[in-house]
């Protein structure tokens, strides 16, 4: 991983903490995975090992459930797994954890694939010799292991480690006990392996109704860890699965399926968020038992938990994000205010900015909230050194240079001006634009009477039209309601930027502008954080929304922006970072639409 960069662009030495590096380095030093062997029948083992060539490698995975769009929290997990794999010369699997037939859809599979690819993780995915080349061939689907999971369940039954329980849901709940009370054994717990096997096959063959029975691990109903009180392994659910269709009417539970997926792929470090800490004993129990039976390799994968990423003013519950989309509080999953990777991308975030943010947020065992401002700061730090500059007037009012015609030889004469694309990178070239008699300026750049500390336009004051000439304000016109409709000024001769003697007249104000003659009209969408509430999710969702998260303005921008491409952040001088809207651009049509990614500085406190 690259070390973080501070504000001035120099590398800082102290990398943000990531305890997982120590875990991996320790394992590698001890050769923890080098001697991995299969405990039992080697024929089966070879079959399940799927021909992975180097079991000693660090092997990570990112296992999303395809039931929604990925968000900033997933970006953290993607970054963590893929970067650790890269750093230690290993591989990382993109695995769709599609064990739940009801909520999963192809649309989500596609969007996850896009997000991982866009974030820059395509090449170090996997190293199965049978799957060279494209991202798609490197993908893993949990549902491809359903046959194995079923066989493993039969093995557990045969070994007396699992039983079919037919208590009613109410009985099951009552007998589970709680934090203070041990559970009570089910009356079905003493069934013989033969009985259990026969009954489990009847479950599989559709002889029992949905919910009539579950397969449970036989561990300890009195365990202080409720997750060890005979957790469910399989349930009956008649639902069509996106991959296996109607082949199955029983489906594995997540807690059973996930360790098996990791083991079959020979994952070394299975990283998840802290809420799974109490599941770890079952993870180990299951893989230890299956390794004893020779069904998975030993040593098996180990689970490590880290604190999930929480960002202030950001909601990361998939369910609540879905609600915002379905009730149309936002313009789809990729609305630029959404914390989805698709939304951040459309907003103007780049993969580098998200990676920098993930790195800076640290990877620890203790949670907390990261300030939204640090997300924007990461974007600015990435864009400032590379973003082309442009002038844009977001709240335009007309400025008329009344002596233009006399000085320039006619009111319609235009003067050529230019500016560097980037002030510190002459190699990026120059941008060209015109100056004429009529100019668009920001409404807030004019005042009738000078406020304290204000050095822009007021009658009698001189300012420079940035990259152009010095002008002197002579007055302004207001309509009957007092609204400013025009500002007047005169041009001061021989002051054009870049010409000899241009600095003879010193001015304190430098204002941005575009000439009416060559300005490009644009719709500019000024986005703010979607939630006013700093820690959303605690109260009524809709009341926590920021009512002012979108303001649309009709702006005039530099003509060079006609060629702006979505995905390339541009600094609108004085205003911040903007990007051409991908959706509007893809739709074609006349409108030129820009999204604000972030302001020049954090101004939320105001
Ligand atoms: P669900 O409630 O649907 O399970 P989920 O956010 O856990 O939601 P998954 O698709 O299961 O979604 O997540 C994939 C991976 O992303 C998991 O390993 C999960 O731990 C990780 N992940 C999800 N949210 C965050 C977060 N906020 N910070 C870090 N990692 C996260
Ligand atoms: Mg999950």
Image: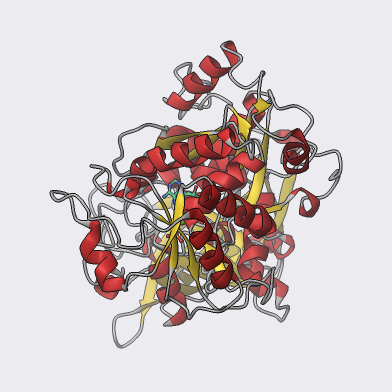
Residue 106 visible to the viewer: yes
The relative height of residue 423 versus residue 168 in the rendered view (above or below) is above
In the foreground, 79 or 45: 45
In the foreground, 573 or 602: 602
For this view, does 362 lie left or right of residue 176?
right
Residue 516 visible to the viewer: no
Which image quarter: residue 535? bottom left
What residue is at 86 percent from the left and 46 percent from the top? 133
What residue is at 37 percent from the left and 65 percent from the top? 530
Query: Percent position (x, y) of residue 393?
Result: 51, 64
Query: Percent position (x, y) of residue 330?
Result: 45, 75
Which image quarter: residue 176? bottom left
In the image, farthest residue toward the top:
29
In the foreground, 174 or 67: 174
The relative height of residue 15 versus residue 426 in the rendered view (above or below) is above
Coloration of the structure image:
secondary structure
What residue is at 43 percent from the left and 46 percent from the top? 375
Specify the quadrant that holds the N terminus.
top right
Query: Percent position (x, y) of residue 391?
Result: 57, 56
For this view, does 21 lie left or right of residue 93?
left
In the image, farthest residue toward the left:
180
In the foreground, 465 or 600: 600
The relative height of residue 111 versus residue 398 in the rendered view (above or below) is above
Specify the quadrant that holds the C terminus.
bottom left
In the image, farthest residue toward the bottom:
480
Query: Percent position (x, y) of residue 173?
Result: 25, 65
């Amino acid at each position: 991983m690259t070390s973080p960069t501070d504000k001035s662009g120099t590398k800082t030495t102290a990398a943000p903490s990531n305890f997982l590096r120590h875990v991996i380095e320790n394992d590698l030093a001890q050769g923890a995975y080098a001697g991995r062997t299969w405990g039992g029948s080697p024929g089966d083992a070879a079959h399940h090992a799927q021909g992975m060539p180097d079991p000693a490698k660090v092997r990570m995975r990112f296992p999303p459930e395809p039931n929604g769009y990925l968000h900033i929290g997933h970006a953290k997990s993607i970054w963590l797994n893929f970067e650790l794999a890269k750093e230690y010369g290993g591989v990382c699997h993109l695995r769709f954890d599609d064990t739940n037939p009801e909520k999963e859809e192809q649309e989500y599979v596609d969007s996850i694939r896009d997000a991982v690819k866009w974030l820059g993780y395509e090449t170090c995915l996997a190293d199965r010799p049978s799957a060279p080349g494209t991202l798609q061939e490197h993908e893993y689907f949990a549902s491809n292991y359903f046959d194995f999971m079923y066989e493993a369940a039969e093995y557990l039954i045969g070994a007396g480690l699992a039983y079919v329980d037919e208590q009613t849901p109410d009985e099951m709940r009552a007998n589970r006990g709680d934090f203070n009370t041990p559970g009570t054994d089910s009356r079905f717990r003493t069934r013989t392996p033969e009985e259990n096997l026969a009954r489990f096959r009847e479950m599989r063959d559709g002889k029992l109704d949905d919910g009539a029975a579950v397969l449970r691990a036989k561990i300890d109903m009195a365990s202080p860890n409720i997750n060890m009180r005979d957790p469910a392994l399989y349930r009956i659910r008649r639902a069509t699965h996106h991959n296996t269709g109607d082949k199955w009417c029983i489906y594995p539970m997540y807690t059973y399926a996930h360790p098996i997926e990791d083991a079959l792929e020979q994952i070394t470090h299975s990283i998840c968020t802290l809420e799974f800490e109490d599941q770890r004993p079952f993870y180990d129990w299951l893989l230890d038992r299956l390794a004893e039976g020779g069904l998975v390799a030993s040593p098996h994968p180990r689970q490590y938990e880290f604190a999930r990423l929480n960002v202030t003013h950001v909601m990361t519950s998939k369910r609540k994000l879905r609600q915002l989309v379905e009730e149309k509080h936002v313009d789809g999953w990729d609305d630029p205010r959404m914390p989805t990777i698709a939304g951040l991308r459309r907003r103007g975030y780049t993969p580098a900015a998200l990676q920098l943010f993930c790195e800076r947020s640290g990877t620890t065992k203790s949670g907390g909230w990261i300030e939204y401002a640090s997300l924007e700061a990461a974007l600015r730090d990435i864009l400032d050194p590379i973003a082309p500059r442009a002038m844009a007037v977001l709240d335009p009012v007309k400025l008329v240079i009344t002596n233009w015609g006399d000085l320039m030889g006619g009111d319609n004469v235009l003067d050529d001006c230019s500016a560097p694309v980037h002030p510190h990178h002459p190699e990026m070239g120059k941008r060209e634009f015109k100056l004429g008699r009529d100019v668009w300026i920001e409404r807030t750049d004019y005042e009738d009477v000078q406020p304290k500390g204000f050095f822009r336009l007021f009658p009698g004051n001189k300012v420079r039209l940035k990259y152009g000439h010095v002008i002197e304000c002579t007055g302004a016109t207001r309509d009957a309601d007092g609204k400013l409709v025009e500002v007047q000024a005169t041009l001061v001769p021989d002051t054009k930027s870049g010409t000899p003697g241009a600095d003879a007249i010193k001015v304190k104000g430098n204002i941005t502008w575009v000439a009416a003659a060559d300005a490009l009209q644009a719709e500019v969408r000024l986005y703010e954080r979607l939630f006013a509430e700093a820690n959303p999710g605690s109260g009524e969702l809709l009341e926590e929304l920021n009512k002012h998260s979108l303001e649309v303005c009709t702006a005039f921008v530099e003509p060079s922006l006609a060629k702006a491409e979505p995905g390339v952040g541009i600094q609108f001088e004085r205003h911040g970072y903007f990007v051409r809207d991908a959706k509007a651009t893809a739709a074609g049509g006349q409108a030129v639409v820009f999204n604000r990614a972030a302001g020049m500085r954090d101004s939320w406190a105001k």
